[in-house]
Amino acid sequence: MLISIVAPCYNEEDVVERFHEAVQQIADDLLPLGHDMEFVYVDDGSRDRTLPLLQQLAAADPRVRYVSFSRNFGKEAALLAGLRHATGDSVVVMDADLQHPPELIHRMVELRGQGYDQVLARRSRKGDRVTRTLTARLYYRLVNRLVDVELKDGVGDFRLLSRRVVDAVLGL
């Protein structure tokens, strides 16, 4: 099974190489289990050295591809471009700033193997200030009263999607 890692990048020169090393290690760990990996980076108009670093990564590793925007279009546009360029049977979407722990990819792939089309990583509020936790709870209670779909607190962009889900998103 091919797993695509999609990582939007905006001014990530300080972390993109460390991020790539971390996901490369995950790829090396998953290879004996029958999972190959590709890395799709989307440079969202960075003004630092992110793009040249992505070019170097692509030159050194045939599994790396990148998309480069002429200006900053925003994270959502970068995510969509990454999904369009990902060819994997499953796609992991995550931030390149190492805020999403790459080691969780193992568990996400395991759950995908159990038939889940979407595996979401949810951040813990442990360690947050009490005011931050209470504000977040209040926000999600209010929003969930206004919308038809329940939004979970702490669920961001770090997720694994099956090809079926990716194709559905791209078909919207």
Image: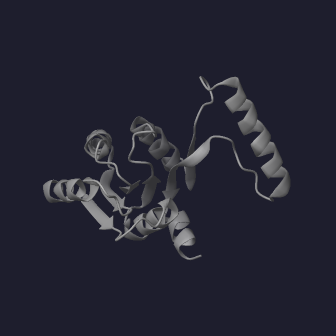
- Residue located 51% across and 57% down the image: 161
* 154 relative to 61 in the view: left or right: right
Along the viewing direction, whichever of 172 and 118 lies nearer the viewer? 172
Residue furthest to the right in view is 145
99 and 69: which is toward the camera: 69
Q: Residue furthest left?
A: 60
Depicted 69 relative to depicted 18: above or below: below
Horizontal arrangement in the rendering, residue 28 relative to residue 171 (left or right): left
Q: Position of residue 8 (x, y in %)?
A: 40, 56
Q: Quadrant of residue 24?
A: top left
Q: Is residue 38 above or below residue 122?
A: below
Figure check: 69 above or below 30: below
Using residue 15 as the reference point, say whether residue 142 is left or right of it: right
Q: Residue 149, how many percent across, how many down?
A: 76, 57
Q: Is residue 136 left or right of residue 52?
A: right
Task: Indicate the quadrant where residue 51 lies.
Answer: bottom left
Give me the residue at 69% from left, 45% from top: 152
- Across and down, in percent, residue 70 comes to 34, 71
The x, y position of residue 67, in whole percent, is 32, 67
Q: 23 or 79: nearer the eye?
A: 79
Number of numbered tags placed on the structure image: 0
Residue shown at 38% from the left, 47% from the top = 96
